[in-house]
C-alpha cells in the first residue's frame, strides 16, 4: 500500500482519474494486484469490483473446494469490507 499511497491519496493522478472514470461509466476496471482502494468513493463501483475480484480469487485458490456455498461467499465478502473499514 505505501508504495502506491501517493497515487491513491493525491488528487488528480492518473489512478484517481481512472477511478473516477470507472465510477461514472464503469470504464477502465480495477486490478486486484496491486489492490488500490478508492478511498474517495468507498462504497462505489470501483471497490465493489475489487471485492468481486477478491472473492473470485479466493474461490480459485480453493475456497469451498472450488464450489463455495452462498454463506462462504458472503463470509469472504464481509471479511473484505470489514478489513477495509
Image (spheres, rainbow, N blue to C red):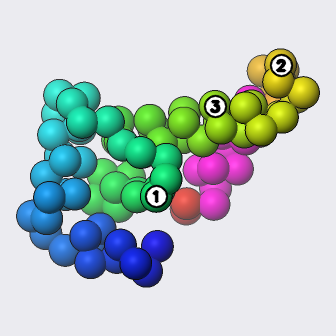
Mark 1 is surrounded, within 10 Å at the Cα level, by few (under 14), some (14 to 19) or many (20 or more) other residues, namely: few
Mark 2 is surrounded, within 10 Å at the Cα level, by few (under 14), some (14 to 19) or many (20 or more) other residues, namely: few
Q: List x then y, in percent, for residue 42.
A: 38, 52
Compared across the picture, whether 55 is left or right of 15 comes to: right
Residue shown at 46%/58% (left/top)? 34
The residue carrying mark 3 is 56
The residue carrying mark 1 is 34
Residue shown at 83%/19% (left/top)? 67
User: Label 2 to label 1, Cα distance in Å?
Assistant: 26 Å
Residue shown at 90%/27% (left/top)? 65
Q: Which residues are magenta?
A: 73-83
Vertical comparison of 56 with 38: above or below: above
Which of the 4 quarters of the picture holds residue 40? bottom left
Choose the circle earlier in sequence order: 2 or 1: 1
Q: Which residue ends up furthest to the right in the rendered image?
A: 65
Q: Which residue ends up furthest to the left in the rendered image?
A: 12
Report the predominant secondary structure element of the magenta stretch: helix
Disc 1 on helix, strand or loop? loop
Q: Nearer the viewer, residue 5 or 73?
A: 5
Disc 3 on helix, strand or loop? helix
Q: Are marks 3 and 2 in contact (CB under 8 Å)?
A: no
Disc 2 on helix, strand or loop? loop
The residue carrying mark 2 is 67
Magenta run includes residue 80: yes
Which quarter of the rendered picture does the C terminus lie within? bottom right
Compared across the picture, whether 72 is left or right of 19 comes to: right
Amino acid at each position: 500500500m505505501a508504495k502506491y499511497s501517493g497515487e491513491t491519496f493525491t488528487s488528480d493522478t492518473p489512478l484517481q482519474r481512472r477511478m473516477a472514470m470507472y465510477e461514472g461509466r464503469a470504464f477502465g476496471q480495477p486490478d486486484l494486484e496491486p489492490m488500490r482502494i478508492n478511498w474517495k468513493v468507498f462504497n462505489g463501483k470501483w471497490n465493489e469490483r475489487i471485492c468481486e475480484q477478491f472473492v473470485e480469487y479466493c474461490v480459485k485458490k480453493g475456497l469451498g473446494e472450488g464450489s463455495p456455498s452462498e454463506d462462504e461467499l458472503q463470509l469472504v465478502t464481509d471479511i473484505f469490507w470489514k478489513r477495509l473499514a
